[in-house]
Image (cartoon, grey):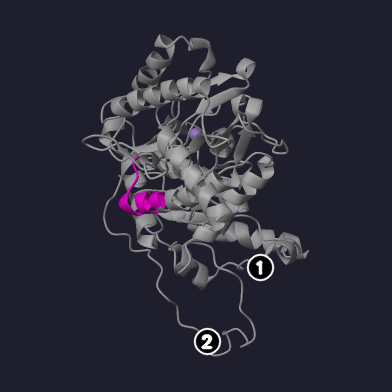
Amino acid sequence: MKTSSGAALLLLAACSNAPTSTSSRPAASTSEDLTIPRPAPVGPLAAPAASSDGPRMAGPSADASIPLDVYRKRRRALMDKLGAKEHGKPPSAALVAGDMTFNGLREGMDVYYLTGVDEAGASVVLTPGARVYTEKLIVAPFDAEGQRWNGERAILPSRPMELSTGFAKIYRDSALPWLLVGACEQYGSLAFVQEYKPDPEPKPRAQELYAKAVERTYGCQVNDLHGLVARMREVKGPEELALMRKAIEYTAAGHAAALSAIHDGSREFQVKDAVEDAFRRAGSRHVAYESIVGSGRNSAVLHYPKDDRIMTSGELVLIDAAAEAEYYAADVTRTMPVSGKYTPEQREIYDIVLRAQKAGIDAVRVGATVEDVDRATRQVIIDAGYYDYYIHGCCHFVGLEVHDPGDYVRPLPAGAVITVEPGIYLPQRGFGVRIEDEVLVTDGAAEVLSAAIPKDPDVIEKKMADARASKSR
Ligand SMILES: [Mn+2]
């Protein structure tokens, strides 16, 4: 009985805010949102007991680098685009669903980008031009028993959570079918603004929910505005760039630690541990992705997943490892000699990869495409005779996800950050070389954000020699 009456209450709550008029379709509005939460009066007995800390509130913490207002502006910008004339489509409502995860890589960050809410299962419904609530936050179901395992969450309605997230209207996930059918009634359309996913990846949740809402209404259209959020995320704002630079600082500390952790007889996992320990000591809470430390023949394996090999003099060790700053990822790869000195054949390949990378970085500019950059790197490697040994793309976007969403075909905008990471992999010779930096697209020459992490082979040899000298002292 308890659960069913609880569900009925929720439905009522959703109903009471469901749009009722079908006659007047709203136009996109940029007017100031009147639904910004304000503190509510608190009755004298409503305060928690002095001993209780209460649940942790969703949304950016007090010391977060990106304040609520930035997230609000992003949502407003997205809402403006939902009814923009350039699409030639009428204004519609949009659901942005995400499931932030870290499965070796961080993924599913659209909702975090729009809200700063780092809870899996959260979504946002945007209804531009709505009379009262233009934006609604949807959070995962309440699970009283589960939260004893996973941490206490707020019970809705929660004024503290409205204040901590900046949303005046917060629902549980079970309200989503109501909200979408209501949006179909009011707007006659829903806009799909996230990214398509090919098989066998799971279908985006918004697409699944839209199909059900369309089935429950007559004539509700789905406007295809896919990639809208991705293209917003492509252009990094100043607060984001500051965090990305911080992530690279942490990453630099890790790569510096590698220079002294690598020696004849080191285990790969020991080098990995030294690198990741330095990330955390520098201030990073989390790695941006599972670190790769591959020595000898393993340096020729792109995503070498193990780390138990003992490295010996004369081999190369490839380190693809980077840190995170408030969920913003870095992505950097260096290839170092175990002995402290590259052999002539290693050096020959290293120099080709370095030249290919430089050609790629030189090609990064506003208006160029990632394909242009790819061609620039590839040409150097083809000319050197290693066409078959450069087996991956040159570049990807970086941001909240290490493989950030973005458009690989359209011209790059200023503010985009991509990696440039050519490689030559020669398992038959027992080594591979990859050199990866992050590059910021600007109106002028591209800026190499990770330039402080040494990649000149002479500098790497010198630094390794210095590290060894100071250790034996
Ligand atoms: Mn990469």
Span of residues in magenta = 235-245
Picture disc at residue 398: none
Above or below — where is 465 with respect to 390? below
In the rendered structure, the answer to whether residue 100 lies left or right of residue 228 reads right
- The quadrant in which residue 145 appears is bottom right
- Residue 58: x and y in percent read 54, 63
* Outermost residue, front side: 473
Q: Residues within 10 Å of mark 2 (few under 14, many from 20)?
A: few
Task: Please identify the residue farthest to the right as the structure is shown.
Answer: 1
Disc 2 is placed on an element classified as loop
69 w.r.t. 362: above or below:
below
467 left or right of 101 in image: left
Type of the residue with mark 1:
Glu
Disc 1 C-beta below 8 A from ligand 1: no
The amino acid type of the residue labelled 2 equals Gly
Q: Which residue is at the far bottom?
A: 44
The front one of 148 and 270 is: 270
Image point (45%, 78%), residue name: 40
Report the residue marked by disc 2: 43
Give the residue at mark 1. 152
Residue 118 in picture, x, y percent from top left: 54, 55
Which mark is in front, 1 or 2?
A: 1
- State the image coordinates of residue 275 (x, y, percent, origin top left): 57, 49
Q: Which badge, 1 or 2, is on the more N-terminal residue? A: 2
Instruction: Locate the C terminus by quadrant.
Output: bottom right
Q: Which residue is drawn at 42% across and 43% down?
A: 453
Position of 93 compared to 155: left or right?
left
Q: How many marks?
A: 2
Label 1, label 2: how far apart the Cα atoms are: 23 Å
Is 90 within the magenta? no
